[in-house]
Image (tube, helix red, strand yellow):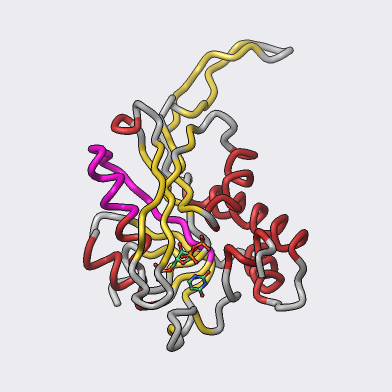
Amino acid sequence: MDMEKVHILDHPLLQHKLSILRDETTGVKEFREVVSEVASLMCYEATRDLPLEEVEIKTPITTARFNSIAGKKLAIVPILRAGLGMVEGILTLIPSVKVGHIGLYRDPQTLQPVEYYCKMPTDIAERDVIILDPMLATGGSASAAIQFIKNYDVKHIKLMNIIAAPEGVERVHKDHPDVEIYCAALDQCLNDHGYIVPGLGDAGDRIFGTK
Ligand code: PRP
Ligand code: URA
């Protein structure tokens, strides 16, 4: 597997919180809170390459030039449903980011993604986009979402997943070699139902308490 475009974020805080998510005894309230915290910590790393510019600031002592984010236009696009759980955590760090939505669910028989909703910021073509989804399993949903956003003429796309499976990484690499993947863990494999092993189960169900 070509790991050049995969960033596995191994910060101890992130790894600790990921273990809480994996634990089947973690209840819906804590699960939701920790998904949000994990998204914040991942956002910190995924935005490491944001350009800075110098601006003049008057401190109580003197006036000098200091760093400020260079007005780079960003958007985040959660894949519904589970990606929604990561939005709040990103907004904590980047409150002004615009948010698009893509509704996809995975057909349980074919494992193929089915699209049911899409709403993007009108100026999405001028923005760099970070796609959010806690799970990258077969990669079908992520690959379809990336293609969807590329169809809007977006040039720079990153994919942020809490847990990725090797199969999903391969699929995204093959379909979209330009897209960098940020994840907190690269797990072993998929089981016969397309679930990540060891994984954390069904992310949407655990965030929204639907099972
Ligand atoms: C989950 C997950 C991803 C997708 C990953 O969503 O949040 O979107 O599966 O699987 P893939 O890589 O094999 O495509 P799901 O289809 O369960 O929908 P939900 O978020 O509405 O529960
Ligand atoms: N979707 C999930 O929510 N979990 C998995 O393990 C795979 C796909």
Q: At 23% from the left edge and 38% from the top edge, which residue is drawn?
A: 153
Looking at the picture, tell me which residue is in the foreground, 44 or 156. Answer: 156
Residue 165 x %, y %: 43, 76
Q: At 56% from the left edge and 78% from the top edge, which residue is drawn?
A: 199
- Write the start and end of the magenta stretch as one range: 145-162
Quadrant containing the C terminus in the rendered view:
bottom right
Is 208 included in the stretch rendered in magenta? no
Would residue 71 be found to the left or right of residue 176 on screen?
right
Residue 208 x %, y %: 66, 59
Q: At 33% from the left edge and 62% from the top edge, which residue is drawn?
A: 5
Tell me: residue 23, above or below residue 206.
below
Tell me: residue 43, above or below residue 32.
above
Looking at the picture, tell me which residue is in the foreground, 101 or 168. Answer: 101
Residue 36 x %, y %: 65, 52
Question: Quarter of the image holding residue 129?
Answer: top left
Question: Quarter of the image holding residue 50?
Answer: top left
Looking at the picture, tell me which residue is in the foreground, 127 or 61. Answer: 127
Tell me: residue 189, above or below residue 46.
below
Q: At 71% from the left edge and 78% from the top edge, which residue is drawn?
A: 24
